[in-house]
Image: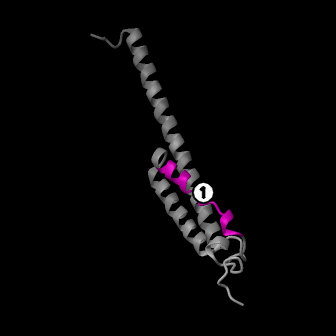
Amino acid sequence: MSFDDQNQNPYTANNLNEGPPGPGGGNVASVSDYLVWAIISTLCCCPPLGVVSIIFSALTMGAKSSGNYAVAMQHSKKAKIFLWIAVGLGLAFWTLYILAYVLMFILAAAATASGELQVQ
């Protein structure tokens, strides 16, 4: 039996995710790598943790390409955890930053209205 025909060989590029499950069982195509979200969190939220999330996303893609489902799932979960921590810290930082700015504006307006601050 020849495996030259792509329809018969379950390990060709076209059928890689349709063949038998890889090590650890499961379909590697169903594992999300969260790369786009990791990049967005790096740019908008918390760069250090976003970079860690990008690294785990890249490791997830590598495990997916080798067909290792168990390792791909582990790296995917870590990428997701660091992604959400980065988003949470980023949201906390920007919320505190905006609140501090608004508080400074209110205090400056109150000081100006009470005459403590002279505007010349």
**Quadrant including the C terminus:** top left
Residue 109, given in percent of the width and then of the height, sits at 42, 15
**Quadrant including the N terminus:** bottom right
Question: Magenta stretch?
Answer: 27-42
Residue 84, given in percent of the width and then of the height, sits at 58, 51
Residue 98, given in percent of the width and then of the height, sits at 48, 31
Residue at 58% x, 56% y is: 34
Question: Quick check: 61 above or below 49?
Answer: below
For residue 29, which quarter of the picture? bottom right
Residue at 33% x, 14% y is: 117
Q: Does the magenta stretch include residue 28?
A: yes
Residue at disc 1, secondary structure: helix
Q: How many marks?
A: 1
Q: Check disc 1 and report the residue beneath it.
A: 80
| Amino acid type, residue under disc 1 in the picture | Lys
82 or 119, which lies in front?
82
Question: Looking at the magenta stretch, what is its main secondary structure?
Answer: helix
Q: Would residue 25 appear left or right of 45 to someone viewing this image?
A: right
